[in-house]
Image: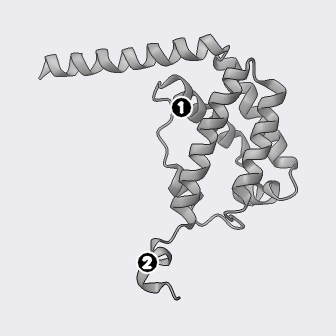
Amino acid sequence: MEHELQARAAHLAGIREKAEAEMASMGIDAAFIDRLVDTFYGRVQAHPRLGPVFDERLTGRWPDHMEKMKRFWSSVAFKNGAYGGKPVQAHLGVEGMAADLFPEWLTLFSQTLSDIAPSEQAKAWFMATAERIAKSLTLSLFYNPALDDPARKTV
């Protein structure tokens, strides 16, 4: 049993080391993650559609949310396990949440990366990751498989 635990720990350490090396090759470090989150969510707060939705949910809790998002992006980029939340559950029941907000979120994220990403590779990596996250959240929050049931289709 102890050997299995040591092997797993070594495996996880290898994953983290590989991720850190990949991020470093693109110019990504913890300071960039902080800057990305601060810049992006500053823009979210000023956005005419996104701002009110986020403010409704986060009034008085923005600093906590910012730290959570820094842990989230650190965990995604560096595979370090810094984030342990449940994004789908966090977005369920958010007043004003709508599927058509995700493209606006992605556009704002892309603009932020264009302004601050240290390399084209970093911008591409973060955009691809954000697109997967947005798609996953959209499907989890708004997709109803019953609507795709062939038996419900009319000719």
Residue 76 has which mark?
Answer: 1
Residue 149 left/right relative to 33: left
> Relative to residue 105, is residue 84 drawn left or right?
left
Which residue is depicted at the point 82% across and 48% down?
A: 45
- Quadrant of the frame with the N terminus: top left
* Dot 1 alpha-carbon crowd within 10 angstroms: few under 14, some 14 to 19, many 20 or more: some
Coloured how?
one colour
Residue 22 image point, x, y percent: 55, 15
Mark 1 → mark 2, Cα distance in angstroms = 34 Å
Answer above or below: position of 154 versus 19. below
Determine crowd level at label 2: few under 14, some 14-19, many 20+ residues with C-alpha closer than 10 A.
few
Would residue 20 be visible to someone looking at this image? yes
Residue in the picture at 73% in, 18% down: 119
Residue at point 50%, 19% (across, down): 19
Outermost residue on the left side: it is: 1
The circle drawn on residue 149 is 2
Q: Secondary structure at mark 2?
A: loop
Q: Is residue 68 visible?
A: no
Whole-percent x and y of residue 152? Answer: 46, 85
Q: Secondary structure at mark 1?
A: helix
Vertical order, 65 against 92 (above or below):
above
Q: Residue furthest bottom?
A: 154
